[in-house]
Image: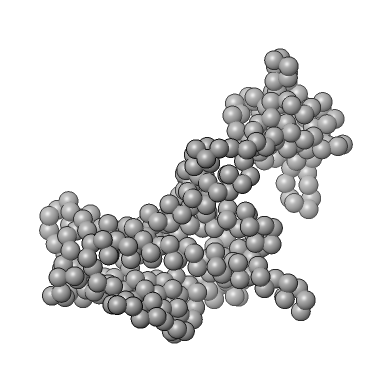
């Protein structure tokens, strides 16, 4: 009971972080609707029954029972309308700017959060800052101040590359080339297996240094690009059947892992939120009906071909896609409850 009570603040932080992703995404759609003169009747955070709402001049702002997703309800989105402020009566380029704005805002949010993380933590150089006592590194003769230039003949420019090479080495004997006092020195060692963390360690930590504003922004962009590549790689593995259903999680898993991240500190929660924001942005541009990507695909077709798609057929396709999407969400939620992801 005490554990549950002490975790409540972290759970709330996780919910707020998850909600931020949805708010930013829908805010992107909402702002572009306003810029393009499209009437918005509802701005909803969450799905299901209405908890409470605030009625604006023409838009009702709603909070719904289940903190899963959200939406911006536009005039003419589901069926054709004679209203000049209808979504369907706008040009393909205007509609494209509206539907793509959500994913773009998620990417922007990721860059900002990663930049803040970079400014908070600085960056880690491939220079030895700490050598763990009685570790393979200490016994091999590695010293503080040594700069790692190569691992197993692979050039090392960043600390992340060093960690990747150590991990990929799988505990085998490895050669590390270092620069010490302007002289190159080769060191051989065998990583030690950490049974608890299920990984191999050498016993070294990189040297951390602070970065300025420009460097933190650059860090934000670089981390967003790196995360995007990993997500596309995951989707590729998923498409080829190399990913188990146990490796896929939904809202409950996201809240669980976000709560765990919040327990380790606000910076780690921001890092996770940035990664999830990239994931949400990329997921939404998948060309599937009812997702933003489905709209983007159809609008690009209109722009390239110069032919307007039938509004009633588009509405039917999106409705069917929405039903499939809801069924998938129900499946993921049930899977999260019955067979939760293991962290």
Residue at x 60% of width, y 33% of height: 158
Q: Residue 113's x, y, as percent?
A: 52, 52
- Between 93 and 343, the one lying in front of the other is 93
Does any portion of residue 245 appear in the rendered image? no
Name above or below for residue 106 compared with residue 74: above
Name above or below for residue 61 compared with residue 237: below
Among the 4 quarters of the image, the one containing residue 283: bottom left
Q: Residue 187's x, y, as percent?
A: 76, 24
Left or right? Give the position of 336 relative to 5.
left
- Between 19 and 96, the one lying in front of the other is 19
Q: Residue 247's x, y, as percent?
A: 57, 60
Q: Residue 260's x, y, as percent?
A: 66, 63
Name above or below for residue 201 compared with residue 24: above
Does any portion of residue 335 appear in the rendered image? yes
Among the 4 quarters of the image, the one containing residue 129: top right
The quadrant of the picture occupied by the C terminus is: bottom right
């Amino acid at each position: 009971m005490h554990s549950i009570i002490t975790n409540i603040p972290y759970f709330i932080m996780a919910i707020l972080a998850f909600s931020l992703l949805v708010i930013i995404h829908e805010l992107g759609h909402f702002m572009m609707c306003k810029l393009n003169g499209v009437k918005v009747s509802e701005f909803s955070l969450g799905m299901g029954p209405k908890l409470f709402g605030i009625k604006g001049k023409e838009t009702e702002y709603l909070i719904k029972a289940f903190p899963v997703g959200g939406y911006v309800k536009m005039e003419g989105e589901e069926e054709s309308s004679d209203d000049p402020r209808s979504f369907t009566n706008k040009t393909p380029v205007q509609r494209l700017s509206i539907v793509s704005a959500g994913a773009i805002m998620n990417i922007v949010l990721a860059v900002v959060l990663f930049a803040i993380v970079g400014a908070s933590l600085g960056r880690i150089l491939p220079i030895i800052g700490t050598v763990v006592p009685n570790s393979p590194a200490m016994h091999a003769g590695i010293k503080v101040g040594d700069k790692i230039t190569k691992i197993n003949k692979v050039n090392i420019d960043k600390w992340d590359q060093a960690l990747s090479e150590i991990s990929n080495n799988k505990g085998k004997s490895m050669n590390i080339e270092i620069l010490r006092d302007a002289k190159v020195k080769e060191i051989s060692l065998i990583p030690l297996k950490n049974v608890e963390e299920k990984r191999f360690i050498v016993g070294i930590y990189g040297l951390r240094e602070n970065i300025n504003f420009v460097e933190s922004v650059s860090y934000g962009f670089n981390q967003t690009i790196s995360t995007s590549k990993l997500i596309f790689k995951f989707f590729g593995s998923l498409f080829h059947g190399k990913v188990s259903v146990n490796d896929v999680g939904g809202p409950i898993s996201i809240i669980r892992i976000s709560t765990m991240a919040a327990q380790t500190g606000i910076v780690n929660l921001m890092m996770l939120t940035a990664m999830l924001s990239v994931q949400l942005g990329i997921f939404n541009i998948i060309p599937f009906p009812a997702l933003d990507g489905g709209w983007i695909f159809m609008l690009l077709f209109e722009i390239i071909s110069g032919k307007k798609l039938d509004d009633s057929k588009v509405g039917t396709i999106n409705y069917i896609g929405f039903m499939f999407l809801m069924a998938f969400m129900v499946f993921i939620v049930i899977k999260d409850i019955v067979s939760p992801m293991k962290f």
